[in-house]
Amino acid sequence: MGHLHPDLLQRLHAAVGDAGLVSDSQAKAPYETDWLKKWTGRSSIVVRPADTAQTAAVMRICHETHTPVVTQGGNTGMSGGATPDGSGAQVVLSTVRMNAIRALDPLNDTLTCEAGVLLANIQAAAQAADRFFPLSLGAEGSCTIGGNLATNAGGIAVLRYGNTRELALGLEVVLPDGRVWDGLRALRKDNAGYDLRDLFIGSEGTLGVITAAVLKLHPRPVARATAWVGARAIDALVGLLAQLRAACGERLVAFEMMSAESLALILAHVTDVRPPLAGAHAFHALIELADTQGDGLAALLEGGLGDALEQGTVQDVALSVSGAQTQSFWKIREGIAQAQMRAGKAVKHDIALPISAIAAFAHEAEAALRAAQPDVRIINFGHLGDGNLHYNVLLPLDTTPEVLAASTAQFNRIVHDIVAAANGSISAEHGVGQLRRDELRHYKSEVEFDLMMRIKQSLDPNQIMNPGKLI
């Protein structure tokens, strides 16, 4: 175990009590390895404060003793941002005991809750009040809203509702020195100074501990229309997206894309799924409309896709006629992560591009990767509607760590250079963590990185917040 301040454990115990400490090595293990089993570290102790006051006490102690802190929510991240390092000197601060929904205001369409509330529980609370919280992603039954905010999570509804940043009105944050910033304002307009809320959203635990948030709610959709389409090229799907946005407006809530290789992978490795279309298509899209009024929604989608068929933009369409069929479509889309883990070792790229640049990127990246390794297996899928691609390269399961490391460096440079040339981002929704930390330094401008470092040093002068992550 790394060097610890002599009275650290005693002071932490005084702050949070027996229920707030996890010290047994076996009990600590789930907090020390990420769910992908890609990163493993060691913590000096896991602290589980029950409320904001206890969190503030913990942070004062760690600030005074220069003890590094890794904040962790549901531990469902994709970039290793919530895993301690191997020194044994870092404290893991888990927010899971801070799981209260403090208030729900249906007239203001807001919900105030603590950071450890599961995303699925927020969705359920909103629904019980005949409202809708639109953040939705595969880990929603396990991830916490604090982690969603810390990584500015995306998900399947960004096209209509935006990232987590667009779904939050106010925050409560414990600063590295233990002071509490109460920014829990349920206001849609507030120009009184710098927007500190947006400073902490997406900061990945490097600037403070998010302990509570005011979230935006929306009217609950009562009708949905869903379809699966097949096209010859990704260019056609980009064109279809533009057509449907013009025809359907804000009713278009999801436009998910996957290549034929991605679909084949899912069909081979995920149980109880079947091809949505009879023929073979190079690219597929899962499209969904939603509205607070049910009349005409299915006809609107059918009409738009009928026009696309007549124009040759797409080659086949399957319109969902039941809830079960819609669920089966989404099971295919949500099965990609599971299929990749079963089929091989993925070099993952979570990239964002202007939608107008996606087709050119896909063609250029595939050509460059195949020039480097002719038999490369490209798994291209993602949220086409908001420009976020998960452009992955799948290597065999028996790939050695040495080959995986070399291939990762090679593929990252190829893919990320093309993304940078298109003025895109190498991290769209998963966060930087430790996975993309060094890549971020390569692509951020000197000025931008200097500004980030100045903010970090100003708020966290003792450099204790999630060291080794993000920057």
Image (cartoon, helix red, strand yellow):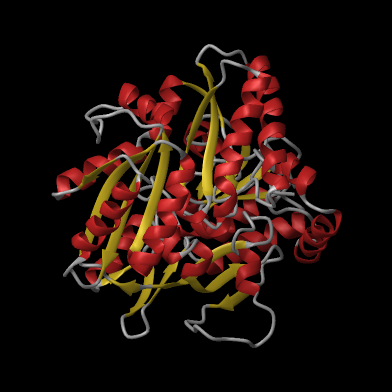
Q: In the displayed structure, would residue 227 be above or below residue 230?
A: below
Residue at far left of view: 322
- Spot occupied by residue 118 in the image (x, y as percentages of width and height): 38, 56
Q: In the displayed structure, would residue 22 be above or below residue 278?
A: below
Residue 193 sits in which quadrant?
bottom right
Residue 218 sits in which quadrant?
bottom left
Q: Is residue 342 visible?
A: yes
- Spot occupied by residue 259 in the image (x, y as percentages of width and height): 43, 34
Q: In the displayed structure, would residue 172 be above or below residue 361?
A: below
Nearer the observer, 269 or 265: 265
- Spot occupied by residue 327 in the image (x, y as percentages of width and height): 22, 45
- Spot occupied by residue 88 in the image (x, y as percentages of width and height): 67, 36
Q: Is residue 117 visible?
A: no
Nearer the observer, 35 or 65: 35
How many numbered discs? 0
Residue 362 sits in which quadrant?
top right
Which quadrant does the N terminus fall into? top right
Q: Please name the residue shown 41% across and 32% down the image.
A: 282
* 9 sits left or right of 278 in the view: right
Nearer the observer, 148 or 75: 148
Q: Please name the residue shown 24% across and 73% down the image.
A: 129
Nearer the observer, 304 or 350: 304
Q: Please name the residue shown 34% across and 23% down the image.
A: 269
